[in-house]
Amino acid sequence: MVRAFLFLFLAHLALVIAALADCLGGEHAPRKLTRAWWVAIILLVPVAGGILWFAVGRARPRPQPGPGSTGSSGGPRSPRGPVAPDDDPDFLRDIDRRLRDDNKED
């Protein structure tokens, strides 16, 4: 019985520490309330405070649209330019030219 209480206490302590670290260490402002209010909720409401922080208060940074993205689609974006050397037409053309030059020398 003591082991169960010790396990629950350590789990609660881990949740509180993780929630506090995330709340105080984030670079984005929390949603709904200020950081001070969230710290008070995490510390004063035993288990629900940490769960509320991760469910409601944690800021979700908005994805920044990159170059070439339309911003409206949430699907995968096609990359601009070649991804690998064998996708680059200039690279393939240069290899083909080198192979032809090597074959002419033989």
Image (spheres, rainbow, N blue to C red):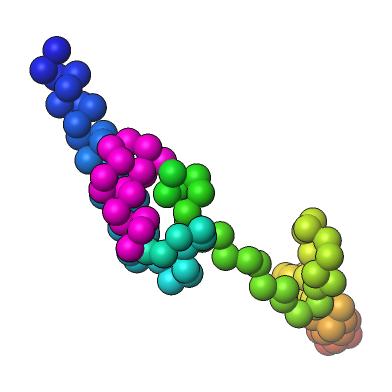
Tell me if I can see residue 18 in this picture: no
| Residue at the spot 47% in from the left edge and 68% down from the top edge | 29
Quadrant that contains the C terminus: bottom right
Q: Nearer the viewer, residue 56 or 7?
A: 56
**Picture layout, residue 45 above or below residue 23:** above
Q: Which residues are magenta?
A: 36-51
| Residue at the spot 56% in from the left edge and 60% down from the top edge | 60
Q: Residue 49's spot in the image, x, y percent?
A: 36, 43
Furthest toward the top, the residue is 1
Q: Residue 88's spot in the image, x, y percent?
A: 81, 76
| Residue at the spot 31% in from the left edge and 56% down from the top edge | 39
Toward which corner of the image does residue 69 lie, by quadrant?
Answer: bottom right
Magenta residues, dominant SS class: helix
Residue 90 relative to residue 27: left or right: right
Q: Nearer the viewer, residue 91 or 47?
A: 47
Toward which corner of the image does residue 62 lie, by quadrant?
Answer: bottom right
Q: Residue 25's spot in the image, x, y percent?
A: 34, 66
Residue 60 relative to residue 39: left or right: right
Tell me if I can see residue 73 in this picture: yes
Q: Is residue 41 magenta?
A: yes
